[in-house]
Image (tube, rainbow, N blue to C red):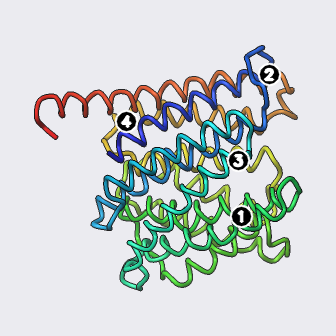
Amino acid sequence: MLAWIACLGLVATVAVGAWLRWWLAGVPLPVHDYGAIRHLHTHLGYYAVLFPLMWLGWAGLGVPTPGRRLLLAYVAVVLLSAAGFAHRGYGPAAIAGSTGVLGIWLVSAWRARGLIRPKAGWLATVPLGIVLGAGIVPQVAIHAGTPQAAEAVRSFLGMLLLVSLVPTALARGRAWPFPGLGWFVVAVVAALSLGVLTVPAARAGLLVVGLLVGFAGLSARVPVDVRAAWAVAGAGLAATGAGLLELDGPVAVAGTHFLILGPVLLTLWPTRLAPAWRLGLLGALGLMCAGILGGGILGGQTAATLTAVSGTVLALGWGALAVRNLWSRAVSCGTGGG
């Protein structure tokens, strides 16, 4: 069931992302509220793609995951939140659905609490990342509509990504593990430095995280192009932590998309991908990130068009993979294979 949720969620997420990119490129598409649709895109990515894929990765590593009833409830609250975000952004429906989502995340963290031990390797920090991320949510509610809320959201998403999702992917890729306590400390500091922790020295955590992610990714038992993607992602994090890249909007958007749609998704994806397909996805992703970053060099319209075209190719690629996965599972179920 997790694979079904992740594949359907991926199709919806990349479709909304491509839609927004063409709107930003000047195509008169029906976008009633850019902020609301952007929230829909972001939250669908985390709710309907990344967490189901993370749980699927847990299952492959022998870690307890939510059962069928809990997953059915999860689908219901994700749909409620998605409808709410699409309609009014952070309105009552989105808040209610997101509260349900967060509750199920915490249940999954509790069930995986046995991981919090040194011998669990990368997975040792995963339940704690979910819990600490949840602890930031009240700051979002208290400061709703203010810059402080945006900072809290960045740290919340960073906590989930750096302390839970990235370690799960590295564990799934059987990367060489670093000491859990050391990783946990620097990853938490790095996540907080993305928003709520404005002390300049905290950005050093992002430098260390980038170096560790890059070296660990190179050691993972994944195809060489995926290892290279991990190295590039780690280098980007390290460069930002070292102050070589300013952590502004384009850098944050490009970096997040590269990390998620590149090494994380390619490592957590439940089926093996052909080399040409992986390289095509990474090539489109690289062009999209170049477009996001290249407004000052290419010109705003050229960069926006490049981002929209490459983003659409990327969306079609991942969407085709998701549909193929769904079709193969449907055929398997229809023939009695599960």
- Label 4: how many Cα within 10 Å (few below 14, some 14–19, many 20+): few
Q: Distance between the Cα atoms at labels 4 and 1?
A: 34 Å
Image quarter in which the N terminus is found = top left
Contact flag, marks 4 and 1 (Cβ < 8 Å)? no
Task: Give the residue displayed 37% in from the left and 80% down from the top.
Answer: 114
Label 4, on which residue? 275
Label 2, on which residue? 302
**Which callout, 2 or 3, points to the residue nearer the camera?**
3
Q: Distance between the Cα atoms at labels 2 and 4?
A: 30 Å
Report x, y in % for residue 43.
62, 46
> What is the number of the mark on residue 92?
3
Three-letter code for the amino acid on which mark 3 is drawn: Pro
**Which callout, 3 or 1, points to the residue nearer the camera?**
3
**Which callout, 2 or 1, points to the residue nearer the camera?**
1
> What is the number of the mark on residue 155?
1
| Side of 74 relative to 64 (left or right) | right
Q: Secondary structure at mark 3?
A: helix
**Which callout, 3 or 4, points to the residue nearer the camera?**
3
Q: Secondary structure at mark 4?
A: helix
Decide: is 155 above or below 337.
below
**Numbered circles on residues, count:** 4
